Each structure stands twice: as structure tokens, then as C-alpha cells.
Image (tube, rainbow, N blue to C red):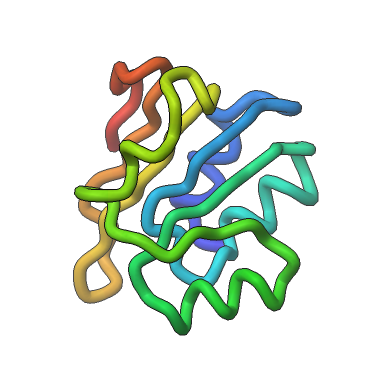
Amino acid sequence: MKNEFQVIADLIEKDKKVLDVGCADGTLMKFLKDNKNINIRGLEISKEKVQECIAKGLTVIEGNAEKDLKQFPDKSFDYVQKHYQMNGITHQIYICVQSKIFFTL
């Protein structure tokens, strides 16, 4: 597992509801679901990545975060996480609670 995924996992409490924005292949989602009993959902723009997640038994919606986050009612999740990578380098990790960013790396 990627180092930044362990940082995220350490910040999120067990038994919570989490939205993973840009969840890619679902690696972090699967880890959180299996190891922290997280009720996790994903939002991913790539149809191929969504299919990979579904094949892993994960719940993912194909969509664009800029347009499709509005479909979730307020307070649907305890945490919303998004980590930003470019060329394999993590630039930012955002962990939000009730619409407030409380951790960025």
C-alpha cells in the first residue's frame, strides 16, 4: 500500500462513512473497508477504473467531482477524502469533515 494511504487510514476512525473522490482502482477503498470497517463509496471519472472497483466488490459511481458531488445530500458522509497525484507524485491529500478541511499534506 502507498505510504500516503497509510496516513489517510490513520486519520479516519473505524466504523465511519467515507466518500473517496477520484478513487481510481479502489485500492484505498478496499483497505479501509477491510481493515477499518468503513462504509465507503467512491466517485471516479474513469469508466475502466469504476469497473475495476466494482470487480473488487466496491460501491462506486462514475462521475465528475465538479458536477456530481451535488447528488449526495448534506451530511451523507463522516469523511470525504481526495488525494491529488500528478505523474505518480502526491501533491495534496485532503481529508474533510462536515465540509471543513482538517488535514492537508
Residue sitting at x 20%, y 68%: 86
- Left or right of 54: which side holds 2? left
In front of the other: 44 or 2: 44
- In the image, is residue 27 above or below residue 13? below
For the C terminus, give its image quadrant.
top left
State the quadrant of the N terminus: bottom right
Which quadrant of the structure image shows residue 28?
bottom right
For the point 44% across and 68% down, the residue is 24
Q: Position of residue 57 (x, y in %)?
A: 74, 66
Whether 30 is drawn above or below 73: the answer is: below
Q: Which residue occupies the foreground of this view, 3 or 26?
A: 26
Tell which residue pokes out farthest to the bottom in this image.
48
Compared across the picture, whether 80 is left or right of 93 comes to: right
- Image height check: is 29 above or below 55? above
Residue name at image x 70 percent, y 77 percent: 55
Residue 62 on image: x %, y %:
43, 65
The location of residue 95, given as percent across then percent down, is 39, 31
Above or below 79: residue 91: below
Left-right relation of 63 to 25: left
* Foreground residue among 44 and 11: 44
